[in-house]
Structures are given as structure tokens and as C-alpha cells.
Image: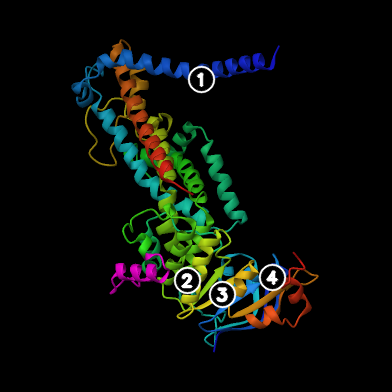
Amino acid sequence: MSKISVKGLHFYYGNFLALSNVNVEIQERHITALIGPSGCGKSTFLRCLNRMNDTIPGTRLTGQVLLDGKDIYAPGTDVVALRQRVGMVFQRPNPFPQSVFDNVAFGPRVLGLDKGNNLHDIVEESLRGADLWDEVKDNLAQDALSLSLGQQQRLCIARVIAVKPEVILMDEPCSALDPIATLRIEELMRRLKEQYTIVIVTHNMQQAARVSDYTGFFWVDERRSGMLVEYGLTTQIFTNPRDKRTEDYITGRFG
Amino acid sequence: MSRQQVQRIGFALLALAAITVVLPILLVIGNIVVRGLAAINWEFLTAMPKNGMKAGGIFPALVGTLLLTLGTAVVCIPMGVGGAIYLSEYARDTWLTRAIRLAIVNLAGIPSIVYGLFGLGLFVLFLQFGTSILAGSLTLAIMTLPVIISTSEEALRAVPMEFRTVSFSLGGTRWQGIRNIVLPQALPGIITGIILGLLRAAGETAPILFTVAAFYLPRLPRSPFDQTMALPYHLYVISTQVPGMPEHIQYGTALVLLAVVLSMNLVATLIRSYFRRRRQW
């Protein structure tokens, strides 16, 4: 079943067409990987899915992004509520310079989810969900920045889980991490997809092949506009790509 | 000459330059401390001046300066920090905000006597506050605002953009991100700016000259519409306007003013270094 349907999406920075006619159905409770060369618009596309591009002046979008059948760009959409439903994990681990507890509690606090619920329970549940609880449970007051980078990234995932989203967007979440920490995040993602719909942008094709169920391949045309060349089951994209460019890219012919 | 010799001479010249800067400060402070210390006692700090200021204490001037600094703080902290938040977090880059920034930079460069005359015209005469603590505080606040706005804005801008983005991505409003993440991070810088601004206000004579300062008023002010004595002006008066003034009272007054200002400076430095050690981004 598709959680997000993108229909005829064009995205502009000023007059520059950054994404051209993207159409894709993102499946619920599966992992969708977006791959492609730098500058092909895959991160821009990811940020279209929770309207994070709204914060950049001079951007414009046409087409539709339907979340559970409702266009998130329709006038009157509650952007705050949307971002609660569609959370985001960034490239560089970026916990707030506060305690572990306050980091996870930030979302529930600003959204008012802590009223009537025990904040400590939400925090524990989220840290368990992000596979970090056992490492931090003895000292939730410690500064988040004293954790290792891998732990910091799992903390950021816990921070997202704490607002109880439906979709988690991950923008190259492992690019700053070592292989062991990367592996842990990948294991975590496999577990998370039982509950959440995950879309991940990655430069690491092995990672896409390892964790994702579906893969989208982005490419830039001669006007430097990004487009989705091919989209399908990961096994099909990696073993039997339909498009020549996909095949060249995944076999490493572009380096 | 060998390279090492050139280097040694260079270092010597640089050290000389540093000493030339520090030495006069030490001499001034040392001179005031040595000659002023004799006048300092409990009575000097807590008694009214007597005998046309030639005896007694400086209590009303000390209280006046503290009241003026407090009044200045009450007006310019919310306005200054609020303005900085607006400029750094909300305002788009338009001709209007560029004009505001330009105005702030220029305001910081205006001589303090001009603020004094402006305060006389606007607060004392036009708004009919009279020569009063209210008029003096407002005048000092206007003078202090540019300092507080520009240091606060700088402190806010130093907080990485990423934190605001993350706050958005978690469903926070712009204000929630500012309130919960950006402001706490910028606070040490903001507090330092506030103290440095207030410290300048506490030591200025020209802005209070026409707006609040009393030549000789041996009682405490009873309302914001009262005049008051103030340390900088009092020092000016007893140093130049009263013949036969005992020297130890002059130096004692200078020492108290210096102590008020330097202790504020010290607090600012301590706050800054405490938070700088904790900051990790």
C-alpha cells in the first residue's frame, strides 16, 4: 500500500528547475532508498516530502505530494502537524547541546504530547526504539555531545521517534559514521520499518542494496535538472535495471 | 643580521607595544586606588554629603547611579534583545532591515553628549518628564541599545542554523526553536553584551548632564520623576566646580565609580569564560 504518492512534481530554486516531473509511490512500512550522483536532487526531493524546503526563500513547487491521499501542499495544510507525521534524520548527527533526556523530550514538549503522558516513559520508549537505551539509561542527564557519533545519530533517531511519526526521512544518515556504527543504524532501520515508512537518501550503493526494499535512481539531465530515472524493487534495480544509466551507475561505470 | 636576531627584535618591539598599552591603565588604576583608599569607609559609602560636599559621604550619588543603571536595564534589555531576535531570526533581508542595521551601527558611533541633548529635547522638555530619573534612564537606554542589539544579534547568529532546522523538522514553531534552543545557546553572549552596555551607561556623564543629574541633592530620590545625584557627574562636580575640595574625597569617589564599573566588567568576563568552556559546537 502506498503511503506517499508523488505526482508530477517539479521543484524550482528561483528560476532553476531542480527537479523535473517526479512520479513515485512510496510503500508503507518499507524502506525506500534514493540513490544517484551528487547534485541530482535526491536530498531536495526528500525535503519536499515534509516541506522542509519551505524554509528556503525563493523555492517553488508544482505537482502533488499525497500523504495518505491528502496533498500536503494544499492550502491550509498544517505544516507543524505534517512535520510531526513525517520526521527527519540529518546527514551529520546534530543533537542539541543539551542532555540526552532533553533532546528526546524536545519534540513531545513543543508539540504538547507530554500533557497527560509521562515524559519519562516517552523518552525511555523512544531510546529503546532507537536501540540506545541500554547505553544511556544510567545517565540521562549527560550532555548529548559527549556520546560517540554513532550514538548521537541513534539519539537523533530517538528524538524523531519521540514525536510518534508515520514516516521517517533519512538524509545520508551514515555518511559521518564508521562501518560498525553504520551497521548498527542499518539493523535499527530494519527493525523500524515494522512500524514506520522509511525513505533514505544514500551515496552508498551497498547500503541501498542491503537495507532497502525499493530503490529510486535519480539522474541529472543536460540542463542540470534532477529527475527520477527508474524506480522499483531493490532486487530488480540492482540485478536487472531497465535503464542504461541506472546500470552504468550501479555497476560503478561513473565512479 | 640573522633570522633569529630579526625575530628577537620583532618580539621585543611587540612586547614594548603591549606594555605601552597596559602601563598607563595600571598607573591610572594604581594611582586612584592608592590615593582613594584612604577615603573609603562605611560612612563614606552610606552617608549624605555635608558641608557643601566637602565632608560626609557619597550615598545619594551611589544610589543614583545604581537606580539609573537599573532603569536603563529595565528599558533596554527587553527592547534590545527583542530587536536582536527580530533582526536575526525573523526579518528578511530587505532595504528596511538594511537601513535599520545601518542606523544601529551609526547610533553606536554618536558622541554621548548628543544623546544628552536629544534626551533633554525629547524626554525632559517635549514629553515633560522634567529633569528626572525617568528621563535620564531613557536617555541612557537609547545610548545603550545599539550595543545590546548588535552584540545580541551576533550571539544569535553564532548559533548554528542546523539547530533551527532540526527544531522545524520536529514540528516546532519558529518561536519554540528560538525559545528552547537558540536563546539558551546565545545567552552568554547576550548577557555579556548587556553588561558591557550597562557598564558604559553607568560611567557616562554627558547623557545625564541635562536629563537627571543634580549638582547637590543630599537626599534619596522618592519617585522616577525626581532628580538624583550620580557618581560620574558628582565626580565632575567635586573635581572642577567646588574650590577647596579635599583630595581624598575626589579620589575616593573616583575609586567607587571605578569599582562599580570594573566589578560589572569582571562579572561579564566570568560569565563569558564559564560558558565558553561549556560550549561544544
| Sequence-earlier tag: 4 or 2 | 4
Both labels 4 and 2 in a single chain = yes
| Sequence-earlier tag: 4 or 3 | 4
Instruction: Name the residue that disc number 3 marks.
Output: A211
Instruction: Name the residue that disc number 2 marks.
Output: A188
Instruction: Name the residue that disc number 1 marks.
Output: B21
Decide if residue A6 is in sight here.
no
Q: Is residue A129 magenta?
A: yes
Amino acid on which the number 3 mark rests in the picture: Val
Viewer-proximal residue, A162 or B124? A162
Disc 1 residue crowd, few under 14, some 14–19, many 20+, Cα 10 Å: few
Q: Position of residue B178 (x, y in %)?
A: 44, 58
Instruction: Name the residue that disc number 4 marks.
Output: A36
Chain for disc number 3: A
Residue A127 lies in quadrant: bottom left
In front of the other: label 1 or label 4? 4
Amino acid on which the number 4 mark rests in the picture: Gly
Both labels 1 and 4 in a single chain = no
Disc 4 residue crowd, few under 14, some 14–19, many 20+, Cα 10 Å: many
In the picture shown, does residue B262 fall above or below A76? above
In front of the other: label 4 or label 2? 2
Viewer-proximal residue, A19 or B263? A19
Give, as a single range, the part of the protein colored magenta: A111-133
Chain for disc number 4: A
